[in-house]
Amino acid sequence: MPLSDDDFGFEEEKAGQNLAVLAEALYLINLLLLPGLAFLILVGLWLKYRDSAPPLARQHLRQTTFVSLVGGLLIVTFSGLILGFGGLAWEWTWVALILYFTCIHSTLVLFGMYALIKAMNGQQWRFPLIGPALDTPET
């Protein structure tokens, strides 16, 4: 039997679970392996499925796209501010910059791993502080 466009290789326990797992995996790939390219694929999935995906997949797609944008904005903005105020020549600028980048990036990866676990279990989850609100209560 040929695979459909929505078949990612395993049986879904809940509607949209495969797409939710794919969204969270792309989020982590964007942070760790292929920044930019994975984000473009994630945005493409969001644009394609934002209205037609089941609620679980829609929530994970919306969350990963939004958190990718906010996380990138946080890293670029605060790194720029640290560089702007400290200057390139001051060694403590680099200490602060590397420490900030490492802490924020690591936190985003850790939460992304937790979100992937939730998606694999067919559950909704919201990133603390920067995650968009959940649409519907979990059933």
Image (cartoon, grey):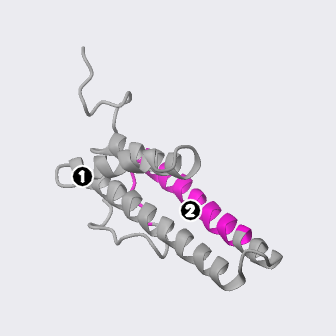
- The extreme front residue here reads 89
Q: Would residue 54 appear left or right of 67 to someone viewing this image?
A: left
Q: Residue 6: where, in percent of width, then height? A: 26, 34
Give the image quarter of residue 11.
Answer: top left
Q: Is residue 109 magenta?
A: yes
Quadrant in which the C terminus appears: bottom left
State whether residue 138 appears in this view.
yes
- Which residue is painted at 41% across and 44% down in the image? 21
Q: Secondary structure at mark 2?
A: helix
Q: Where does the image place residue 71, in percent across and percent down from the top left?
A: 50, 67
Question: Chief secondary structure of the magenta span?
Answer: helix
Calculate the distance from the C-alpha at mark 2 to the C-alpha at mark 1: 23 Å
Q: Earlier in the sequence, mark 2 or mark 1?
A: 1
Residue 102 sits in quarter: bottom right
Q: Residue pushed farthest top?
A: 1
Badge 2: few (under 14), some or many (20 or more) residues near its Cα, within 10 Å?
some
Q: Which mark is residue 117?
A: none
Q: Which is nearer the eye, 102 or 25?
A: 102
Q: Please name the amino acid that badge 1 sits on.
A: Leu
Query: Which segment did they paint magenta?
Result: 98-126
Crowding at dot 1, Cα within 10 Å, few <14 / some 14-19 / many 20+, comes out as few
Question: Who's the residue at 48% across and 70% down the image?
Answer: 73
Which residue extends farthest right?
91
Q: In the rendered structure, are the residues bearing label 2 and label 1 in contact, judged by CB atoms less than 8 Å apart?
A: no
Which residue is denoted by mark 2 in the rendering? Answer: 108
Q: Position of residue 28 (x, y in %)?
A: 52, 49
Query: In the drawing, what numbered circle is on residue 47?
Result: 1
Q: Is residue 136 rendered to the left or right of residue 132?
A: left
Answer yes or no: is residue 124 visible: no
Q: Quadrant of residue 62?
A: bottom left
